[in-house]
Image (cartoon, helix red, strand yellow):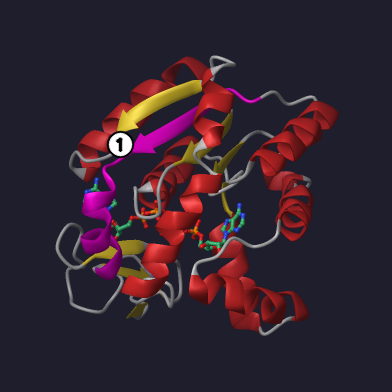
């Protein structure tokens, strides 16, 4: 199953992807997670990316496309994948089409998790992430059992550097480059819109229903 998740920053892409990955046994490929790992490792790629990530600007297409190309060739992606946060521009979408054509792996569905931008500030400023396993929490909507500690692995929770008010505003502005993808995939009959303003479990049920034909 080849799936793309699209949505505004904070729409719930990562939250839903975590669950789908474990239930469907396909890898969750998040360009944001890969870039944050590179930054944390202090690698040359990470040093190049840090300013983009911290400010909320998009990483240049050429770099992003190269990272995804390499990742899709890894063996765990051979039976399907869930792309989260890629593609984000028309150039990335066209490059992905070419990659999947080469691999003879057509896309099954593009899930657009739709939310009003008004709900995002609270979601993003309340988000906390596990340093060890990457699990996502929210102080109000999805709190851990013990404050500051991951339920799954006991790891320490932290706040992302781009979950500040200023970077969130830039990230919302950058979504203008991603919005044309909605029509791009809709015209090909691949788009399914999910109401992302419902409680997390209800969003999940809608995601599972949208994926059912492709399981
Ligand atoms: P990335 O990591 O992709 O960030 P994003 O798109 O801004 O998305 P988020 O991870 O912030 O949100 P999400 O939709 O996953 O929400 P979540 O599930 O966590 O990208 C980061 C940066 O990397 C970019 O700014 C850019 O610099 C770079 N980058 C990445 N990909 C790139 C690309 N392709 N090209 C160029 N640059 C790229 O949920 C948010 C919070 O809300 C959580 O706390 C969660 O618990 C809570 N929540 C989730 N669902 C609900 C719900 N239904 N109700 C209530 N609360 C909820
Ligand atoms: Zn954890």
Which quadrant of the render holds ligand 2? bottom left
Look at the image and say whether residue 148 sits in the magenta stretch.
no
Q: Position of residue 123 (x, y in %)?
A: 25, 59
Q: Residue at x 70, y 60 (%)?
A: 60
In the picture as drawn, the residue positioned furthest to the right comes out as: 102
In front of the other: 126 or 88: 88
Q: Position of residue 50 (x, y in %)?
A: 61, 78
In front of the other: 151 or 65: 65
SS state under label 1 = helix
Q: Residue 33 vs residue 210: left or right?
A: right
Q: Position of residue 148 (x, y in %)?
A: 25, 79
Q: Position of residue 5 (x, y in %)?
A: 48, 39
Q: Residue 215 vs residue 18: left or right?
A: right
Q: Is residue 99 above or below residue 167?
A: above
Q: Mark 1 packing: few (<14 Cα in 10 Å), some, or many (20+)? A: many
Q: Is residue 72 above or below residue 167?
A: above
Q: Which residues are magenta?
A: 107-125
Look at the image and tell me in which quarter the N terminus lies: top right
Q: Residue tagged by mark 1?
A: 204
């Amino acid at each position: 199953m080849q799936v793309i998740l699209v949505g505004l920053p904070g729409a719930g892409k990562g939250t839903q992807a975590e669950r789908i990955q474990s239930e469907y046994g396909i890898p969750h490929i998040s360009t944001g997670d890969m870039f944050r790992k590179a930054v944390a490792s202090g690698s040359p790629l990470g040093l190049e990316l840090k300013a983009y990530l911290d400010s909320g600007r998009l990483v240049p297409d050429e770099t992003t496309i190269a990272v995804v190309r390499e990742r899709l060739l890894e063996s765990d992606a051979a039976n399907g994948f869930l792309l989260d946060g890629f593609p984000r521009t028309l150039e990335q979408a066209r490059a992905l089409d070419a990659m999947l054509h080469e691999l003879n792996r057509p896309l099954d569905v593009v899930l657009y998790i739709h939310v009003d931008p008004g709900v995002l500030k609270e979601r993003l400023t309340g988000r906390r992430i596990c340093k060890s396993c990457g699990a996502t929490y929210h102080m109000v909507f999805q709190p851990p059992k013990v404050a500051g500690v991951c339920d799954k692995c006991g790891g320490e929770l932290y706040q992302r550097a781009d979950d500040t008010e200023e970077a969130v505003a830039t990230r919302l502005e950058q979504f203008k480059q991603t919005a044309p993808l909605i029509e791009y995939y809709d015209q090909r009959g691949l788009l399914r819109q999910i109401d992302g303003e419902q409680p997390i479990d209800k969003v999940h049920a809608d995601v599972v229903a949208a994926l059912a034909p492709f399981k």
